[in-house]
Amino acid sequence: MPLSEFTLLTVSAKQYSYKLKAYAGLFNKLIITQILVSLLLAFAGFSQMSSFGFDTLSVSFLLYSGDMVIACSFIYIASTAIFLTTKSYKRNELPLILNKTAGALSDAGFLLTIGVFAGITSSLAGNLLRVIVYFTSDLPRVFVEGFYLSASELLLGLVAAILYMLLFAALGYFIGIITQISAAFIFILPVTFWGTMNYYPEFSQALFNYFTAETSLPLFILKITVLVILLFGASLLGANRMEVGK
Amino acid sequence: MMVTALSSFLFLILVALLLVLALKNILPARRLKLRIHLTWRMSLSLAGLYLGILILLVPVSCLLPRDAFFQPDESGIQADLLGPSPIESLFVDSTPLTGDLANQPGFYRNGFFTFRAEGDNADKLLLQCDPNIYYTANTIFLEKKKSDDGEIEVHSYAGPQLINNMDCTKQILPPAISYKDGILSIAPATQQRLTFIQFNTDFTVRQFQARAEATPNMNSFSTMSGNKIIYIRIPKSMEIDIGPENSDDQIHLLHNE
């Protein structure tokens, strides 16, 4: 194939296809993580346990939700994104790299794929938890309220979880890229984060609420999409500053 | 407060991730010897299978029968609790309990004991009540039967015990009651612990729901505890001694005429 036929998009697409095959094992690890967390939640119980009592009777409530599965998937996606920028991963793809932009674009494509997969599966894992609890718990002690999810809740959860996954993927990739540019960021980032939280709590709270307190889905989609594009864009620029193979 | 806790959690994640990243860059790469080798086809097929199973679980979880679950019945039981209590007429009239108290709205019979009055003290009854029995909202009613059948009957009833809209009345254990040599001992039931499971929607859904639909605040749960009755029926000719530790205010004698 003549060299002139290699456009940035075709190269990125080929690298994306290669990475999807090469890093297919990352999907398995995500699945194992989600199943383990679901089983742990179903059998060990979780979270806000409140007790009430009158005389000889005390009543406790165990609250179940798929929150932990989603949170663990966030961590997994962010760490995957960071690892994609490390030297050991970059060495594997060295023979295929024509330029850093194509490499970063294919990384972004792979992260979007695994992010969408993680968003869908972590959201649906709540049903896995429900089915496990249904067959393993004393049903007269399980509230019917909250057990059944409506189609709209399911769809809303899917969309929001996918968007959050993409955000964490973009954030992780950005952190990975800038720490590859300079190792000093390994110390600068947590210090900045900690400093902002402690010395500018209103600002960090406002920043946090900007996404998590958004109750309008279209606005939430817009905010996350813009931020994801910005983070991947910044990562792309950062990747171009690095040498091939770094 | 929640934001601070979550920010701290995110900070911890960030530090952990960066620590792993730093270690991965500093330390030489060590591969785990024990590995299961899967081809990319197998890995992606597994991912597809997992996704398929999760999608299949959506209709499965919707089709699970509802009957077996705990379904609070708010309206009826609260009306019973708020309505006139049959116990009030007992205090006012001191008349015997007419009919079965368990059939009265708002009362549930959780225990029934019978003892044969035998031995030297068969014609006397000494009540020995653990002081805690009164702290646990129990009221004792004592009534002489019309006949001398030689049997002591003890009925235990529980009024509505509510936590928010949840009725725990039928979960209340009866007091521990025993009879030996003319002494009827009454002690509170052993401590019970009930654990209920409540499912919440994920935070990714709660974010877009109205505040009222969001996670219930467990600290705002209210409790309502109804009276409990210990109703003792003894043979007609049996002498009653309520014991030095009990007073007439605590043990109500009903006139069976």
Image: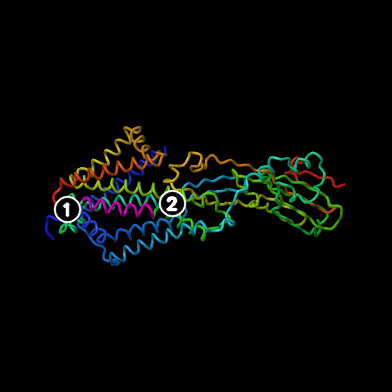
Residue B93 vs residue A241, the one in the foreground = A241
Q: Position of residue A160 (x, y in %)?
A: 39, 46
Say which residue label 1 marks: A7
Task: Estimate the spatial distance between the alpha carbons at disc 2 and disc 1, rounded to whole Å.
Answer: 43 Å
Secondary element type, mark 2: loop
Residue A182 vs residue B26, the one in the foreground = A182
Subunit of label 1: A
Which secondary structure type mostly characterizes the magenta part of the structure? helix
Instruction: Count the marks.
Output: 2
Q: In which quarter of the image is residue B207?
A: top left
Q: Where is residue B33 in the image (x, y as percent from the top left)?
A: 26, 66
Of tags 2 and 1, the one toward the viewer is: 1
Side of A141 relative to A164 (left or right): right
Say which residue label 2 marks: A66
Boundaries of the magenta span: A104-120
Q: What amino acid type is highlighted by mark number 2? A: Gly
Q: What amino acid type is highlighted by mark number 1? A: Thr
Residue B31 vs residue A32, the one in the foreground = A32
Let me know if residue A108 is in the magenta part. Answer: yes
Picture residue at 25% right of the left edge, 45% below the top: A232
Side of B249 relative to A57 (left or right): right
Sequence order check: which comes first, mark 2 or mark 1? Answer: 1
Identify the image's colour scheme: rainbow, by chain, secondary structure or one colour: rainbow
Side of A131 relative to A111 (left or right): right
Subunit of label 2: A
Let me know if residue A152 is in the magenta part. Answer: no
Secondary element type, mark 1: loop
Picture residue at 33% right of the left edge, 42% below the top: A224
Q: How would you rate the neighbour count of disc 2 (Cα within 10 Å): few for under 14, some for 14-19, many for 20 or more?
A: many
Q: How would you rate the neighbour count of disc 1 (Cα within 10 Å): few for under 14, some for 14-19, many for 20 or more?
A: few
Residue A58 vs residue A8, the one in the foreground = A8
Side of A109 relative to B55 (left or right): left
